[in-house]
Structures are given as C-alpha cells and as structure tokens.
Amino acid sequence: MDKRKLGVEGPEIAAIGYGAMSFSDMYGPTNETESHAILDACRDLGVTHLDTANVYGMGKSESAIGSYLKANPDARDEFVIATKATITRDEDGNRCFDNSTEHLEAELDKSLQRLGLDCVDLFYAHRRDPRLSPEETAANLGELVQKGKTRAVGLSEVAPSTLRRAMSVFPIAAVQSEYSLSTRYPELGLVQTCAELGVAMVAFSPVGRSLLTDNPIPGDQIPNLPFLADNPRFVEPNLTENLRLTDGLRNLAKKMGTSAAALSNAWLLTRGEHVIPIPGTRSVAHLRECIAGADLKLSKEDLGRIEAVLPVGWAHGDRYSIAQWNGPERYC
C-alpha cells in the first residue's frame, strides 16, 4: 500500500488506516475475538495506523488493542497507534470537555495502561475545551510529548483558525475530522489549511457510517444503535432518500468492478496527499473492501462520474443532531 506522512516530522504510514471505534459497541455488539481478527487482517493487508480513544466503549477499544499487543508483542513495531481524550462529564453528569494538562495526562496514563504501552505515537485532544485558548491546549499537549508519553499530538473536530493558533505554539501532526462523499465541509478550509501547514488530515467515517457501502446498516437495526437512532441522516424520511441517492454510487462501483466502500475511500485519497482515511468495521470482509480503495487509481473521468451521482450537498439531514453537535467546531 502507498505511504503517507503523519505530519511533517511524523512516520510514514499506510494510506488507509483503521478506526477502532468499531471495537466498542457503537455500531453493534462485538467482542475481543472479533477485534483481534480485524487486527490480524490489518497486518495482512498492510494497515499500519490504528486510531482509538478512551471513550470508545469506555476503554473497551483500547483494551482490545492492548490484549492483542500482549499476545503478539512483535505487532507493536508494525503499528502507529493514536488515541484521544478530552470528553468527560461534569458534576451534574453533563457532557463537557477538559483540555487541562491534569486531565489530559491522567486520561493518557489510563490509556497507556489499557494499551500496555509506555508511549503512544499520537495523542489527540478529542474536542476543543472552550475554556482554554487553542494556544493553551497546544501547550498542554506539548507537555505530554516532553514527558515522553506521546511522540506527537493532534486535534479533532476543530476549525482551521484553531489549528493555525495551536501550531504557533506546538507542532500539530494531525487533525481528525469526519470527511467523506457525504460530509464535505472540510473542503471549506480545513483540507487546505492542513496541506499548507504540513498537517495530516485524518478522515473518520469515510464511508458515511455505512451509507457509502454496498450494505448499509438496515433500517430496522438503527433504533438499537443510540448514535444513529438520533442522527438526522438515519431517521425518516431522510434515511430512505439517502439510501435511494447512494444507490447511484453502488451502481457506479459495480460498473467499475469494485465496491462502494473501496470507491469511497479511493475518492478521499484523491483529495490530497495528506488525507488519510480511517474506516472502521467489525467485518474482515468489509475491511478488505475499504482497503481495496488504496489500489484504485481514479481518472478525472472517474471523479466526474462520482460527482454526477453524489454531487456536493446531496445528503438529506445534518451530519449531527443538535446534541451531537456539542463539541465539534463549526467554521463555515
């Protein structure tokens, strides 16, 4: 698989990584055996970047990676591992964000214990804490590099202006944001700013939470998945329209002799040499479909055909509900 840089001074990683939110029960029940099978497949397919977070299954995702590394110690040198922290609860149980040095370090210490590591390769502030300036958050993250607990730091779901301000204080290796054929707002400044500053643009949910695949999550399963049950794109009448529209992508992929997931990831790879999709899945077969996108070389004609079936703004419904928008920065 082709390689891409994880920041100006970062390591080279495979062009497509793996998003380990799927090791939690976010999109349906899973277990350690299934998660380990995915990690075996990542090694077979040349996937070198693993992305997790302390809140994915409240540590379940990190623990699955940690137990795998314990059973396969040689795998540590094959993976570039990222985790995140910031999301927490206040005294009243309300969702809030904490970018203080004390909170970030305490949570990273817990993550390192679950992962069985002394140091991660990349540590993100999962959301911006509105009580702190971007400069203060960057400085706090930088302390963790200086202490040897992470090799690099990143930001997630932030505006281009926040990235610029943070970069003035400490090098930011990567910015993570939802980015796909169904969520294209990063093209309104974030993709460009990352390219200008030499920051990796890590694209999560590159297959639109299953909409951009050959087998979208069935509608009758969505009420059992709390995140999707409240997500505007997965409630009616939006869901029916989104499935109808993405049939065009599925039909196009079939004509091109590939899968919708592969085509979706291949499209993202054309957005810039710094863009790194991290699809997540509980299925080895689906992982193979996603990774196959790295081998697709799309022509200008191919890109035009994709745009014709899924033009900018095609999706019905916002990418988040009002409650889910608590945290990500809106900048356009």
Image (cartoon, rainbow, N blue to C red):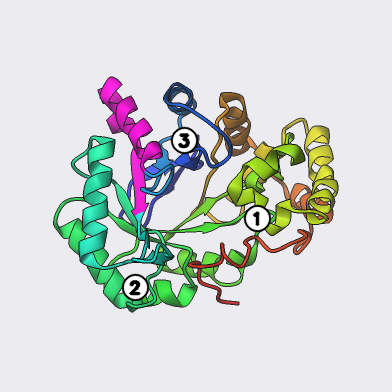
Which residue is the site of mark 3? 23
Where is residue 69? Give x, y as percent.
Answer: 30, 28
Residue beneath the point at 77% across and 30% down: 257
As measured in the structure, the alpha-carbon distance from the residue carrying label 3 to the one carrying label 1 is 21 Å
For the residues bearing labels 3 and 2, Cβ distance under 8 angstroms: no
- Of badges 3 and 2, nearer the viewer stands 3
Q: Residue furthest left?
A: 147
As measured in the structure, the alpha-carbon distance from the residue carrying label 3 to the one carrying label 2 is 31 Å
- Nearer to me, 250 or 68: 68
Residue type, label 1: Asp
Q: Quadrant of residue 85?
A: bottom left
Where is residue 175? Give x, y as percent.
Answer: 44, 60
Residue type, label 2: Ala
Which residue is the site of mark 1? 230
Q: Mark 1 or mark 2, which is nearer the start of the sequence? A: 2
Q: Secondary structure at mark 1?
A: loop
Within-10-Å neighbours for mark 3: few <14, some 14–19, many 20+: many
Does the image show residue 77?
A: yes
